[in-house]
Image (tube, grey):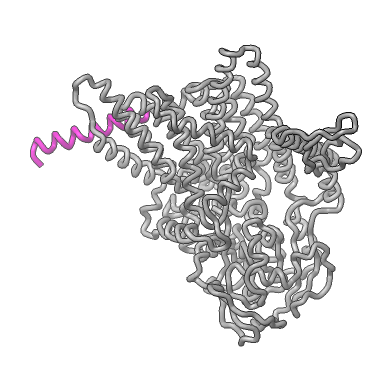
Amino acid sequence: MNAVSWTQSTGGAVKTLTIMRSALAVTTHEIRAHLSMDRVVIMFACLMVLFAAPLIPRAAHDPRMLATLVVHEPILTMALDAMTVWPFGDPGNFFSDNGRLPDYWHNFKCGLFFYYGGAYLDIAFLFFGPLKWLGVPTFPAAPIILRTVSLIAGLLSCIILYNFGRKHSGKWAGILGVFVLFTDSGFRFYTVIIHPDTLQLLMALAVLVLATRHSEDGDCASLAAVGVLAGMFHGVKFGGPWIIPMLIPALYWGWQAASDKAQGTRVIGPAARVFLILTAFAAGFFLTTPYALSPTNHYWISMKQLHLELSSSSVAPINFRTWIGAVIEHRGVWPATAMFISVCVLLLSPLRRDCNKALVLAAVLATCNVMWYSLMGKLYVVPSYFIAAYGLAGLLLGHCIARLLKVVAEHAATFAKPAFCVVLLCCIPLGVKQLALAVELFLTQWNYEKSTHIRIGRWASSRIPAGSSILMDRSAYFDPSLFPNQRLIGEMVRYVDVVHAQCDYLVLSSAVYEAPHYAALRNQGNDILTDLNPFSMSLYKRLGCYDPNPSFPGPTTIPGIELLHVFQQSDSEKETAADSAPHGIILSAASSDCSTRSYDGVTVQGERKQLPAVVSALASRFVREVSGIKADMTSIVGLLRKFVAEEKTVWGPRLHLYKVDRKISYHDPNPIQYEKASGQIGVSAGSPALSVKTRPLAHPSVFFTSLIQSAITSRNDSEPRFGTNAQP
């Protein structure tokens, strides 16, 4: 290498290091500025900590107990635990070699979940790895650390969102943004479980902050910082595709700002800027997801099969309208409409010369969050994936309301205070409703030992012979020391699964057969028992799971399978739920259900006068809102009363426990005439015994069928295992 080449390479390295150092300084400065505290921040932080902190250590002492709460928790805990063995940092170590699985996992096997994690697992690994090597047991340390990361990420997200709104719009915009985010049930749920969504939200807001900085100064340091954080964001949960569109206007505005400051000097062009941000993106991604370069190729295999699964509607048609309808139902029609209008207003604001670039970028990010999942998600609908959109749309709504109130104050000062009071009154129903949901979530998670998942195991410990083989569609806790032979499928169980498992007992959960995303399957398909369709509900129908008043113990319609017990909410719980149902406000003796009655007229001196349609609709809506507030307050009081009194109520899904005769065969014991429809997988009535042992691998559900491969059994690992259809 000659002197010129050496000088050029050295100069390039120095420039790279200078940009990296400047990018780190910019990131530190901006994040620190958006973490400032005031009374509003302290209030929200205290509320979140009081709500979430007591729930962090719950059910963390056993992987089976952990799975009874949320199916993702043992999966991500195993991934973190796998990072502590060689090769260090690879969450797929236990998947690639099940023989390395420690005994304390009770042979609980998971697979192909490695597109999750990234920085979420890395942050937890920084604390858990040294503790594990020092001899600290995985349980409860690993679940507690992962939940703590979720809580802190959610808390920091609220702080950054508030300060971003306060800086670029005003204090009320930040308050309303945090209020909308904090009142989302999905956000509160993600802060108390092992899940990377709160960290993904935090990184999305951090990228937004830095993108705003770059749109104002146009420096390469801020651009590199944006790229690195965007790459880290992508590694958390494959979110890069819905954050990249926001970077395009930020990059353009940054180039314009740099050109304006240059004053005739040379400016880095758009092509070089794109190259820089893409390079930084790749660096951030591989820095936090190094196992994507692993020879085992776990990450890319899971990504490929994830795309295969999510790109088709295996259960019921799901499209953009399905997602938007779910959002409206989740957040309410009026709040959703108001936030939609606010986002549209900010998206159109660049048509004017002077626009608030920070809020435009926030509107683009919120829109892309919704569009990405609603256009690409074809398997199921989860409105809680839009927590970034909810928070940012709430912030933009606060901005628009503040501007509107300012205009009202300038032109009609008399109506300013009444208008402000109307806005506050509109927030009351949302706040009370979400408060009721928050109380319910806290009490049910806190009293997890009173759930049907735990009750069934306690009942079985004294009534079922130890060592019995148990097959489950969803998690229920059976003491592994008494029942080491357990198998978990995770979703629908078919008759062929029961036969092949050679189980002694079968557990079916209403969390599966009454799941909203499987509602269409109840009346679709055939009722032939030996149907091989992975989404067949024939076994649930033939066993009478949909019967509201089952008789037990007693035989079922399938010879060899007997219903032993049904575990469900206690009678006192049902009575309380009935008492807290919406009663409405009685406005007349003839009205006994004001929550559904339409007030279209009024009686004056014996003559009924018809009210205008708009007034009638507003009156009906007002009555429904008041009725809802009353019902929610009644629910809160009832839940708190039971908690204080420590009533022995039971919550959770309805669980059916069946005793199975191992002599049952693949023959349909009660053949039903069936004409196979187009595209269905099945066999005709009276067909010979099937030789099928596993679910068809050609079906698009192959990915999620292998997500949780739980084989808590004494059999060897060469036998087929079962998986789950758990939502990512």
Task: Say if the magenta span includes residue 633.
Answer: no
How many discs appear? 0
Q: Nearer the viewer, residue 116 or 333?
A: 333
Task: Say if the magenta span includes residue 15.
Answer: yes
Where residue 301 appears, x then y in whole percent? 42, 60
Q: Nearer the viewer, residue 345 or 299?
A: 345
Residue at x 61% of width, y 54% of height = 71
Q: Is residue 241 left or right of residue 402?
A: left
Q: Tell me: residue 381, above or below residue 474.
A: above
Residue at x 54% of width, y 71% of height = 717
Q: Quadrant of the N terminus?
A: top left
Q: Is residue 219 left or right of residue 564?
A: left
Where residue 454 appears, x then y in whole percent? 74, 55
Residue 216 lies in quadrant = top left
Residue 516 lies in quadrant = bottom right
Residue at x 46% of width, y 62% of height = 96
Where residue 372 appears, x then y in whole percent? 47, 47
Q: What segment carries the magenta color?
A: 1-25
Note whether residue 367 is visible.
Answer: yes
Where residue 257 appears, x then y in whole percent? 31, 24
Q: Is residue 609 left or right of residue 114?
A: right
Q: Magenta part mainly helix, strand or loop?
A: helix
Note whether residue 643 is visible.
Answer: no
Residue 694 lies in quadrant = bottom right
Q: Is residue 644 left or right of residue 356?
A: right
Q: Tell me: residue 98, above or below residue 400.
A: below
Residue at x 44% of width, y 43% of height = 242
